[in-house]
């Protein structure tokens, strides 16, 4: 499961970055400051998807924290601006954070059982 979260989040990170760059550029050209700011936060969320995906392979606890931060930023920016797709990316980041939590927990349990056995 950690490989799936890692690979999917790397690809989605690229998608979020491209979409957010487009939204930021277009809204800046149209003079919509709130959506432009939300696009800037979307760029950060896309970068956090990359970082979380990279950490999910070896350090799922760190990935869980990174995905949770991405979700919080996504929810905050989508509430402030009119970049509605950022809400979707925030829910995806939240799902990845929950998945990373379960990966971390199962790895920790396996390590404890290995130490006791």
Image: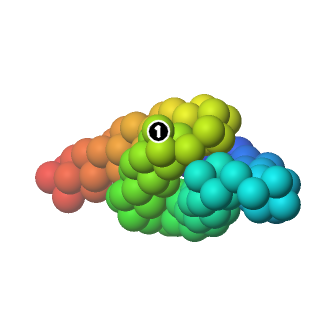
All told, the count of numbered labels is 1
Left or right of 96, for residue 112: left
Disc 1 designates what residue? 79
Packing grade of label 1 (10 A; few <14, some 14-19, many >=20) is: some
Q: Nearer the viewer, residue 113 or 35?
A: 35
Coordinates of residue 41 in the picture (x, y in percent): 57, 59
Residue 28 location, quadrant: bottom right
* Helix, strand or loop at mark 1: helix
Q: Is residue 90 above or below residue 18?
A: above
Left or right of 107, for residue 34: right
Residue 49 location, quadrant: bottom right
Q: Is residue 95 above or below residue 10?
A: above
Q: Nearer the viewer, residue 49 or 61?
A: 49
Q: Is residue 87 visible?
A: yes
Q: Is residue 39 visible?
A: no
Residue at horizontal 63 percent and vertical 34 percent from the top: 84
Q: Nearer the viewer, residue 105 or 34?
A: 34
Coordinates of residue 44 in the picture (x, y in percent): 59, 64
């Amino acid at each position: 499961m950690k490989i799936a979260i890692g690979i999917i989040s790397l690809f989605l990170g690229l998608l979020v970055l491209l979409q957010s760059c487009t939204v930021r550029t277009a809204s800046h050209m149209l003079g919509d400051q709130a959506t432009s700011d939300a696009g800037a936060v979307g760029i950060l969320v896309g970068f956090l998807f990359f970082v979380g995906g990279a950490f999910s392979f070896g350090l799922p606890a760190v990935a869980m924290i990174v995905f949770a931060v991405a979700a919080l930023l996504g929810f905050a920016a989508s509430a402030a601006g009119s970049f509605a797709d950022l809400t979707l990316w925030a829910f995806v980041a939240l799902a990845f954070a929950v998945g990373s939590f379960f990966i971390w927990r199962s790895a920790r349990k396996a390590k404890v059982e290995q130490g006791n056995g």
